[in-house]
Amino acid sequence: MALSCWAVRYMANLSKAEKVYTVFEHIARTYDRGNKRISLGRERVWKEALIQRVCAYVPEAGAILDVCCGTGDIAIGIADKRPQCRVWGLDFSPAMLQRAQEKSKGIKNVLWKKGDAVHLPFPTAYFDSAVISFGLRNTPDYGRVLQEMSRVVKAGGTIWCLDSFLPESRWIRPWYSLYFHYVMPVLGGGRRCRQEYRWLWESTCRFINRRELERLFVQAGLTLLKHSSYMFGACLLQGGLKDSHRK
């Protein structure tokens, strides 16, 4: 269902968390198709790179948490590649979780849980790895989310973040901005959901840059792993290794 003009004005008065919740509850059914269109099909490649990195670092029967899991692509991909691992997908949108559950029928080593990324409902040092893809920029406190992810991961475990960023190149950024401001909302959401995708573009504009993300990783007690940049810096995959002396 599209947001009405009244709803758009209403959203302007909501907190960031409330806006994100409203947006994802509306676009859950079309989210996968929209992402494929706006990324020109590259989203699958970026997510596969994340899945490969996670699987390369976790033990054979490890435990992995996918924070802000959305419709579950990352959690499902990890569970499929590592059937001996236990994989949890967490999101605060019931509509997104319902879609994830539908997509994961028949996969027995993945569980879904409703929860808040800022207050993860898991014990300290429970997981071998935690990931967040295209979700950190939509949270109200980036540093707190990474600290929570670090808390629930064992010493020596890994944290991964895949997200959208504004390209740093002054030659690329104007074209990127034109595409995502004018074309992406219609391409992703069509006539019905273009306002929701416009908000997702705004969340990218307000997001931190790569160096700030690295600083937050370090503050969360992580040693930086080599990052990967895609599409001229419009997408970045950053990993971190939790220091062995951290609890």
Image: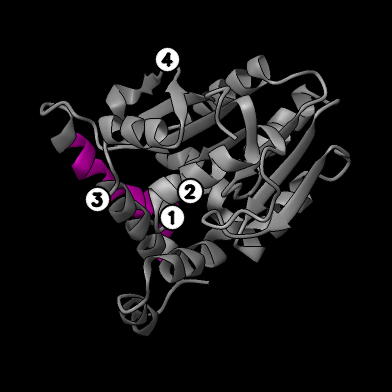
Rounded to the nearest angstrom, the CA distance separating label 2 from label 1 is 8 Å
Rounded to the nearest angstrom, the CA distance separating label 1 from label 3 is 21 Å
The magenta segment is 175-191
Give the amino acid type for the residue marked by disc 4 in the picture: Lys
Residue depth check, mark 1 versus mark 3: number of the one nearer the observer: 1
**Residue 179, magenta (yes or no):** yes
Rounded to the nearest angstrom, the CA distance separating label 4 from label 2 is 21 Å
Q: Which residue is mark 2?
A: 145
Q: Which residue is mark 3?
A: 181
x, y percentage for residue 240?
A: 48, 25
Name the residue nearer the viewer: 222 or 82: 222
Asked if disc 1 and disc 3 are in contact, CB closer than 8 Å, the reply is no
Secondary structure of the residue carrying numbered label 1: loop
Q: Residue at x 66, y 65 (%)?
A: 94
Asked if disc 2 and disc 1 are in contact, CB closer than 8 Å, the reply is yes
Residue depth check, mark 3 versus mark 4: number of the one nearer the observer: 4
N-terminal label among 4 and 2: 2
Q: Is residue 78 left or right of residue 142?
A: right
Secondary structure of the residue carrying numbered label 2: helix
**Res 39 seen here:** no
Give the amino acid type for the residue marked by disc 3 in the picture: His
x, y percentage for residue 43?
A: 49, 32
Q: Residue at x 79, y 47 (%)?
A: 111
